[in-house]
Amino acid sequence: MKHKIFALIVILAFMLTACGGGATGGKTVLRMWVHTNNAFIAGYEPLIAAYEAGHPNVDIQLENFDYELYLQTLQTAMPAKEEADILQLFGTWTSQYYERLAPVPAKVMTIEQAQQTFYAAPIGGYIVDGVLYGMPQEFNMEYGGVLVNKTKFEAAGLTYPPEWQSMDDVVATAIFLAQKDNAGMMSTAGFHFTAADPTAFSFLAGIKQRGGDYWNEDHTGFTFNTPEAHAQLQWMLDVVNAGVVDPVVFNDSTNFVIDAFFQGKVGIGYIGTWAIAEGQNNFPDFADEWDYFYLPPVQGDPVFVADSGWGLTVSPNSKHQDIAWDFVKFVTTVPENAAQWNIASGTIPAMPAVAESAEIASAMPWVPKALAMLPYGEYLGNMPDRDLVVYEIIYPHILNVLQGVETVDQALQAIDTEANSTFK
Amino acid sequence: MDPAGKAQRKSKGGLAIVKRRFVAGVTVPLLLYESLGIFVLGWAFVLIFFDYSSGRLGGPILGLGGSNPFIGLGNFVEMIKGTSVEANLFRVSLRNTLIFAVAILPLNLAITLPLAWLLESIGIRFKSLYRTIYFLPVLTSSVGVALIWMSMYDPQAGWINAIIRFFGGTPVSWLSDPRAGFAGVSVAMWAVILAYLWQDYGYNMVIFIAAFQGIPQELKDAALIDGASPWHVFLKITIPLIRPTMLFVCVMTMLSSFQVFDIIQVMTNGDPGNQTQVLMLDIYKNAFRYQNLGWAAAESFVLFLIVMGVTIFQMRVLRTDWEY
């Protein structure tokens, strides 16, 4: 009998614990999920503490997941309606998850207000079918930014800082920086642009800068097999053939830009600013002097596309959506808070007001260099599956061309067919 | 009524109750566990017929229907003659999986069978030592093995290329050069096959050693007395007698090579140019990266059919009707 009573107490205790989610010790508990990135988390923690200090009845519990695990967790938790109240999402994911996200209430922010508050590229990712589903924290700019090794420039007798007027100047510089070992294998890449994001986003930007587009008129299909796309891919192949990089030895899986640059194997490394914090954390002993610069366009204006950026959304299953949105607004739209997070995470601000601030210029001197370009940024567009299109279609085919196993025409035909097949 | 007999009967009745409780206590959780497994398999089977993504709300019943529409056998039709990236990658992955499995089995047998025979013929002291050394990679995690081989294959700092350079040869990008190949198979695929073989061969070797030890010595002695050479004893006595073990080894090796995942994911993630993309990796990417669960379930079903077919074929070919 004693055992039965004990078992009953244990079961009741579990049931009470399970039913009691949302309020402990008189406080309203909100869970917040983010992907594991130490710099990002270091940005969130003080903001959560500041919000809780201003709202003593709120307890925000931050939980983080490794990137791949985060994707899996979202996929299993959302159908089960077990996801956290506040969800960190990448802007382009919104078009895949919007059915399972709460729209931003008009009293929190309207689309018009959001478009005035944020740059077009980052906010674009959070709008699906005319509905706003979240607020961005960063301008994810994979196009145009490069890490430059000053030590290698000086060793090669090149002018530093570089004064590139055109991409021809960049290629000419990179040829001097590239080196091969005695056996003929490239040991230093002059201009490493052959990782996935740089390759894909310079391809897309090149199409735009040449006056073309990869979307059809009503954005219901892709148009990759165009003269502009052909010209851009041929240009990329010509750059490789000029000897600035060996895409067999330097690509996304072998000698990735960050690793290779901070191990002294790259002169000019094409990568987003997010790589700076990661490189400094992972390679603290790297002794070469370096800085971050922006590339000139292949022609015309520096038009480019960006796939939004990380931001915050709210679950429609949250019992405290009003508090969740208040917190999201506190983190993403209060300029001091947004700046604090961008500085901690090393990301470009999603708000022009923050990007142009003296605080950002002081902490991240590479951001002012980008200010002239940011207004040219357009949102990538709501693709059925951005990762599938970029990582399984565009990048592999372009890399095949650069590695010499596919022709430009074959690649463009394949990209066009496969990318359009993602519209079901 | 005899009080002692009554007590004995009561005791027996009590024992029966305890037995029944024990059986119920053991089988009920097992049945619940099994039913959970059956539900998961059943759910995967249902998904085969839907274009299902967990990111979409779908219909009111388990998210099926609506934005996760029923497509019947559409996934299988697409696999056979579709032009989508999923269909292309499936066919490439299937081809790579077959190459991997077909290469692994004979290579594994070619290494493990003679090695086990050699180990069985040496002294007891060294036998244990060598057996332990050869078995160590089996105990090592696949990720660790992958990292070790990746460092050896590194195009610039790896010692394989260092040796090639030392002898004046041309270094190779073992894991990233899509142009390099041997016998119609990419170098990257051979590189992962070699790493996988190194990790896996100790397992089969130990099984073969156990099989050799199970063969009665008098059978071999009789053959030797009749004038058979050791080679003939091995070929005509040992090999036929270990056919049941051979069947087990072949089936298990084929099963594991069809399901290879971790070592390839870490070493190449399917690169270069999808030349090492195998079915399990493709299933994983579709299910967990691209949320294409219906397609991933259909791919899993195809893999299940292939593995079942190959296993039945092996069992037919290597079946024995006798024991010793």
Image (spheres, coloured by chain):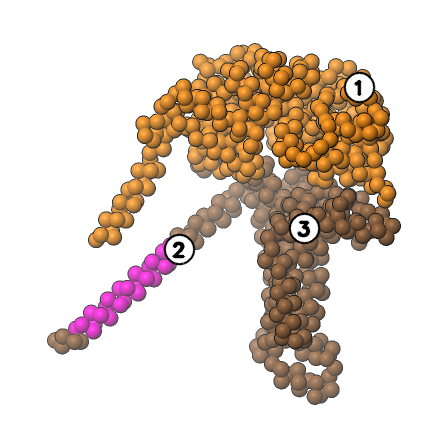
Q: Give the amino acid at mark 1.
A: Trp
- Residue B48 in magenta stretch: no
Residue B198 versus residue A129: which sits nearer the camera? B198
Residue linked to disc 2? B31
In this rendering, is residue A167 above or below B156? above
Task: Give the quarter of the image for residue A368.
Answer: top right
- Which residue is depicted at the point 64% across and 52% down? B145
Subunit ID for the residue under disc 1:
A
Name which quarter of the figure residue B24 lies in.
Answer: bottom left
Q: Residues within 10 Å of mark 3 (few under 14, many from 20)?
A: few
Question: Pointers 3 and 2 in contact (CB under 8 A)?
Answer: no
In the rendered structure, which segment of residues is drawn in magenta? B6-30
A90 vs B290, nearest the viewer: A90
Q: Name the chain under label 2.
A: B
The image position of residue B234, as x and y in percent, is: 70, 76
Task: Provide the secondary structure element on which disc 3 rests.
Answer: helix
Residue at the farthest bottom position? B225
User: Is the residue marked by circle 2 packed among few (<14), some (14-19), or many (20+) residues within 10 Å?
Assistant: few
Chain identifier for the brown-coloured part of the image = B
* Place of residue B62 in the rendered image (x, y in percent of width and height, measured from the top left): 45, 38
Within 10 Å of disc 1 (Cα), the crowding (few <14, some 14-19, many 20+) is some
Helix, strand or loop status at disc 2: helix
Q: Chain of mark 3?
A: B
- Label of residue A164 in the image: 1
Chain letter, colour orange in render: A
Residue in the image at 54% along x and 20% along y: A340
Is residue A405 placed above or below A375 in the rendered structure?
Answer: below
Q: Amino acid at mark 2?
A: Leu
